């Protein structure tokens, strides 16, 4: 049965439609247009110049940054998912309804403070003279470099995405049919094995979407690579700011941005397809 | 013959509930359950929702632990033993099939958990798919099956390890009437073929009485009666069971004295009747007796026939296949039920408000032993 949208439902969806047109689709089209413009004497002029694309895509620096960003975001998504899962599991399965509500409230608190502020405080924590290395020094170890490298970036990204991932995982685990877990136990599947054989596959859609969000947020993150990673070698988002700052190269920045959008769309499509894939015919 | 077989079964019980109590906080879900289940028996536990029947089954499965008392499975005390260490597969009301696995993978699940090799797993699963006539769906996704097919997958998944006992928690409640009857036949035949014990929880009298060897009737955590369907139907133990079965008229009477050699004269509100002495050999004058007369043993006459009995007026009628249930109300406000064939009723020409006289043979009275002990 195909459903035709009624006039009423069309009117209801107008605000969303307008917003998306004004602040997403038009800027996106503009971005695509800009990527073909020409810059002369620090001035942009409308053009159909494929040179920007050629320049950016043919340079090793771009591809190095591309793969570096990819690896960082993937690592952050995997690490966040693994750290988040036991917590989400405990909230969803071991807590009373009242405790659950409190935990969800507590998980939202990090969104109250600016990400930038949190990253600054992480600098204090992670630097060679920071609290963690001071603790290591106390027992005669270190200092371990934790700032201005990949470790620092991952710490920042995980900190950024962890609350959201725990929330998404918890919601998806709440929808796991409790009968399935008892049925698994009843069919001789022990507690830990049930987690991997029944709970994870049952909550697959939510777990994959949560990891996808962590990937998307980390992939586009600019703050952690700059303030915790030192900005060099650059990630794609740092590359974008570099292009705009040096010589008004907005067109090249646009090329990088479009490559990022294509990558995220592909990743999202692949993740959703995988999440909803069903077994059997 | 049947009694002998039962004796044998009971002496070789596979399950024994020894004064089992289950409390959830202040709420007592099961109160002093004390019964045995015979090897190869089809036992139904019946009652309305919240009566403790599912809790009883879950304690047997190891999904709940008794608060007091002991449960023995195959002679071994299983209190505190987790469900994954028992051999008590269960079929859920929701069926609880794994939607992320194919039909075949669902059936193989328990074997995989036991570390059975891939090839043997496949063979054993295929055998059960064939037995349940679902071989053609082996590679299907669970969500693409009909209700009846899912039911068969759930049975195959539970039985693939060839257990001695199968627990079923209202497995047919989601099916339509026609399919329900077909699946009842499947279950009955399966139980006979396998010769294993089935413990079947249901709120439906027709399911329990048509399949079970014995029925346990529960209410508010208590076991009200255990017996064969026939025993329960003919001789309900107390008022609750008689009311639950719904086809008997209940009377509260007082023994007046002997009536002949083998009867008691009993007075009740609205009349007097004679109870067979065998129903209550030790009765004394003035003793209270609660007795029932089943709806199909009640007779109806018109008031002008001169037949002694209870006067009542017709409140309504309900068709039950070839018969009808006539609902009556006495002057004292008691409601009575009389089941008669359409032919008998057409002679009387009844309509709502008609006056009738209700009477019965003294032999059709049955005293409820559980009342006025």
Image: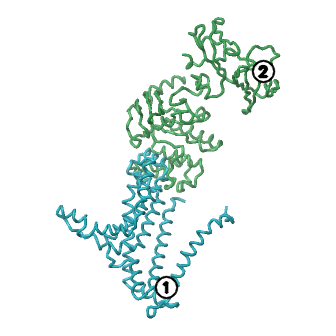
Task: Decide: is B94 above or below B327.
Answer: below
Q: Is residue A220 above or below residue B310?
A: below
x, y percentage for residue A24? 54, 75
Q: Hey, which quadrant is residue A12 in on the image?
A: bottom right
CA separation in Å, label 2 and label 1: 98 Å
Q: Chain of mark 2?
A: B
Compared with A271, A195 (above or below) is: above
Indicate the quadrant where residue B81 lies: top left
Q: Position of residue A69 (x, y in %)?
A: 38, 74
Q: Which residue is mark 1?
A: A35
Element on which disc 1 rests:
loop
Residue drawn 60% across and 72% down? A18
Q: For this rendering, which residue is in front, B358 or B12?
A: B358
Question: On screen, A158 above or below A180?
Answer: below
- Horizontal side of A211 relative to B311 (left or right) equals left
Q: Which residue is labeled 2 in the image?
A: B356
Q: Residue furthest left?
A: A140
Q: Which chain is green?
A: B
Q: Residue at x 80, y 24 (%)?
A: B354
Q: Which chain is cyan?
A: A
Mark toward the viewer: 2 or 1: 1
Task: Identify the residue shown where x is 49% and y is 55%.
Answer: B101
Kindly state the secondary structure of the residue where label 2 is placed: strand
Say if mark 2 contacts mark 1, CB within 8 Å: no
Q: In the picture, residue A223 is in which quadrant? A: bottom left
Horizontal and vertical percent position of residue A185:
42, 46
């Amino acid at each position: 049965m195909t459903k035709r949208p009624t006039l009423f439902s069309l009117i209801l969806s107008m605000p969303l439609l307008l917003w998306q047109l004004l602040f997403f689709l038009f800027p996106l089209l503009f971005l695509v247009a800009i990527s073909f413009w020409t810059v002369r004497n620090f001035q942009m002029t409308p053009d159909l110049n494929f040179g920007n694309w050629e320049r950016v895509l043919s340079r090793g620096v771009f591809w190095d940054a591309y793969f570096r960003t990819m690896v960082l975001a993937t690592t952050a998504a995997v690490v966040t998912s693994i750290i988040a899962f036991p917590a989400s599991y405990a909230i969803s399965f071991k807590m009373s309804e009242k405790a659950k509500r409190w935990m969800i409230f507590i998980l939202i608190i990090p969104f109250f403070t600016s990400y930038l502020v949190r990253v600054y405080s992480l600098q204090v924590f992670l630097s060679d003279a920071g609290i963690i290395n001071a603790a290591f020094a106390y027992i005669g170890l270190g200092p371990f470099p934790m700032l201005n490298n990949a470790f620092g970036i991952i710490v920042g990204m995980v900190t950024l995405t962890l609350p959201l991932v725990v929330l998404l995982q918890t919601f998806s685990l709440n929808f796991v049919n409790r009968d399935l877990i008892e049925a698994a136990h009843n069919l001789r599947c022990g507690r830990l094995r049930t987690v991997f054989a029944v709970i994870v596959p049952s909550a697959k859609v939510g777990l994959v979407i949560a990891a996808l969000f962590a990937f998307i947020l980390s992939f586009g993150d600019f703050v952690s690579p700059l303030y915790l990673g030192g900005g060099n070698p650059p990630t794609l988002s740092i590359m974008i700011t570099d292009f705009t700052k040096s010589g008004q190269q907005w067109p090249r920045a646009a090329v990088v941005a479009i490559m990022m959008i294509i990558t995220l769309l592909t990743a999202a499509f692949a993740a959703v397809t995988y999440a909803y894939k069903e077994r059997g015919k | 013959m049947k009694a002998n077989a039962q004796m044998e079964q009971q002496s070789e019980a596979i399950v024994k509930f020894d004064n089992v109590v289950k409390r959830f906080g202040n709420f007592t879900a099961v109160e002093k359950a004390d019964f045995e289940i015979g090897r190869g028996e089809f036992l139904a536990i019946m009652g309305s929702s919240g009566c403790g029947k599912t809790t009883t089954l879950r304690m047997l499965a190891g999904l709940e632990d008794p608060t007091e008392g002991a449960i023995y499975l195959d002679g071994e005390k299983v209190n505190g033993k987790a469900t994954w260490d028992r051999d008590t597969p269960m079929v859920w009301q929701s069926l609880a099939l794994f939607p992320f696995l194919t039909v075949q993978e669902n059936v193989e699940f328990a074997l995989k958990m036991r570390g059975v090799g891939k090839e043997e797993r496949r063979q054993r699963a295929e055998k059960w798919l064939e037995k349940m006539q679902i071989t053609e769906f082996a590679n299907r996704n669970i969500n693409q099956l009909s209700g009846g097919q899912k039911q068969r997958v759930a049975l195959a998944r539970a039985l693939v390890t060839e257990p001695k006992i199968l627990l079923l928690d209202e497995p047919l409640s989601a099916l339509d009437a026609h399919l329900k009857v077909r699946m009842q036949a499947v279950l009955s035949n399966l139980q006979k073929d396998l010769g294993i014990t089935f413990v079947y929880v249901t709120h439906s009298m027709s399911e329990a009485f048509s399949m079970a060897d014995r029925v346990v009737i529960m209410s508010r955590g208590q076991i009200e009666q255990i017996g064969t369907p026939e025993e329960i139907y003919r001789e309900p133990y107390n008022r609750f069971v008689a009311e639950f079965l719904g086809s008997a008229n209940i009377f509260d009477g007082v023994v007046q004295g002997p009536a002949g050699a083998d009867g008691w004269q009993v007075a009740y509100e609205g009349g007097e009747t004679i109870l067979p002495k065998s129903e209550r050999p030790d009765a004394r004058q003035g003793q209270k007796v609660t007795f029932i007369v089943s709806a199909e043993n009640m007779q109806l006459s018109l008031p002008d026939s001169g037949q002694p009995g209870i006067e009542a007026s017709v409140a309504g009628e309900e068709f039950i296949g070839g018969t009808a249930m006539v609902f009556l109300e006495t002057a004292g406000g008691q409601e009575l039920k009389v089941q008669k064939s359409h032919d008998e009723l057409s002679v009387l020409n009844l309509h709502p408000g008609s006056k009738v006289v209700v009477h019965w043979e003294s032999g059709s009275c049955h005293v409820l032993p559980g009342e006025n002990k």
